[in-house]
Image (cartoon, rainbow, N blue to C red):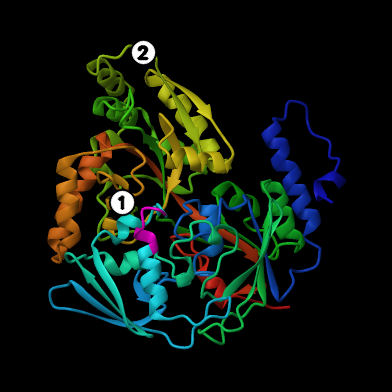
Amino acid sequence: MDATALIRPTYPQGMSAMKRLLATTALALTLALAAAPARAQVLELAVDASPAGLDPHIVTAFSSFQIINGTIYEGLTAIDKNLAVVPALAKSWTVSGDGKAYVFKLVEGATFHDGTAFEAADVVASLHRVLAKEIASPLASRLAAMDKAVATDPHTVEITLKEPSAAFLSALASIAIVPRAYEANKDGLQRAPDGTGPFKFVEWQPNGFISLARHTGYWGKPLPKLEGLKFNIAPESATRQIGLASGQYAMLPNIDAATALQLKGRPNIKLQDTLELAYTLVGMNASKPPFDNPKVREALNYALDRAEIVQAALFGAGTPAGPLSPALKEWAMPLDQFPCATHSVARSQALLKEAGLTTPVAFTLLVLPRQDLKDIAQVVQAELGQAGFKVELKIPELGQFVQDWRNSNFEAFLSINGGAVDPDDNFYRTFRTGGSTNVFKFSDPKLDTILDAARIETDQSKRKMAYNQVQTMLACQGPAAFISYSQLYTAMRTNVNGFEILANRSLATLANTSVSK
């Protein structure tokens, strides 16, 4: 039973519905704190949405990513908490002097969850699967530099590139290795994933839960420390909070600031946080009016008051966004380097006039159905309205949003895009002409030339100069109005040990997590 059903408080007259909800949640949390602690062996997590699928080469939604990345699936490499590339299924590698040939030595004794041995042929098949047109993987651009991959023996893979790629090792961290039997199978892994990770898939009850069990044959023994994971689907924030306070749930991963603030300082609950790599954005379809005109895209940027959005929708737990996260200290340019980052209604209106448009300029904004993004959308709608835009919000269910996003079936959308540790991973597949996640239908030959040159450049200072150019070109007239980088939180019971929050939203450190009694 929902704990709030047992509470019948009396509220002062005039109290808003939101304040009543917060007050009810706070009271319910207080009453729930005396309940028993979370179970020790199977970690009970609560998440806000069902995944859109579980195929690591196809899914894009964070609701899918956090369940499968580093838990069910692994890549040849991984990204650690310091945003450094580290070994994973490849225990070591060597690179030729010209930067075009990689030799990977694989871990031995690893098995897939179906019991078959992990071998070099599975790596080759996985890379081919991502590149296959029939699979239509959004990760394909990350392997654009690859010429061929060969299994020279069961534990060695040689990969040859067409040209050097400075981002290749970090890109491989996002390419999960799947059994070779699925190379041409587009549907088999969406509902029944099969990886080498520390936890294996057991059951998916739609809108109920997804359960994973300890992979007893895991190559990284003695990990994992838990017997299993259960991702409970609980769309209501209050339900998740009360469940954590009562001990029904042991962890709420990757939550927003509003939820974190409700839990801060509560007995038996602790928080971890980090500035995430992912960014919220208004994406614009550059192939359709009015956003086929760069002046209109620039006008939208000037109309946004990013600082106000962070305060109003994120409770101040974030930072206004440029094209790269400030967490990437070696790469990100300061926000004040971009003129349109300074909010100006007058400049926005002038640009719309220069574009030959009469106001209001109407369009529909497709919104990813997450509460923090719905809150941001409300502020964005109001700010754009002041500058002469008339915005209709459309909030579909998650599966429909993903389908419309992938098919570029939108005028504009408000969502969150995953970030990466190398600028090439951030920009190439997203903004290059024909990029595998260039849903904006954006094309700029000059930008393409810079991106092509930067990904093969090995001199760090020259790469920095190139990506400064890219950031400058995208910030104001690109197809994405970068809004914010959020402070990312995970809330857990105080008896949960060993977990470390990662800026890319991966839950890979659940392998090191345990629960004390």
Residue 80 x %, y %: 41, 71
Q: Quadrant of residue 356?
A: top left
Quarter of the image that includes the C terminus? bottom right
Residue 256's spot in the image, x, y percent?
Answer: 55, 50
What is the magenta range?
129-134
- The verdict on residue 465 being magenta is no
Residue at mark 2? 359
Give the residue displayed 39% in from the left and 62% down from the top: 129
Residues under numbered marks 2 and 1 in contact, where contact means CB atoms less than 8 Å apart:
no
Label 2 CA crowd tier, 10 Å (few <14, some 14–19, many 20+): some
Residue bearing mark 1: 429
The picture places residue 262, in percent across and down from the top left corner, at 64, 50
**Type of amino acid at the residue the image marks with label 2:** Thr
Question: Label 1: few (<14), some or many (≥20) within 10 Å?
Answer: many
Q: Residue furthest top?
A: 358
Q: Is residue 265 left or right of residue 399?
A: right
Q: Is residue 487 left or right of residue 336?
A: right
Residue beneath the point at 50% across and 69% down: 73
* Location of residue 410 in the rendering, given as x and y in whole percent from the top left corner: 43, 31
Mark 2 or mark 1: name the one nearer the start of the chain: 2
Q: How many numbered circles are shown?
A: 2
For residue 130: magenta?
yes
In the image, residue 411 above or below residue 432: above
Name the residue type under label 1.
Answer: Arg
> Residue 248 falls in which quadrant of the image?
bottom right
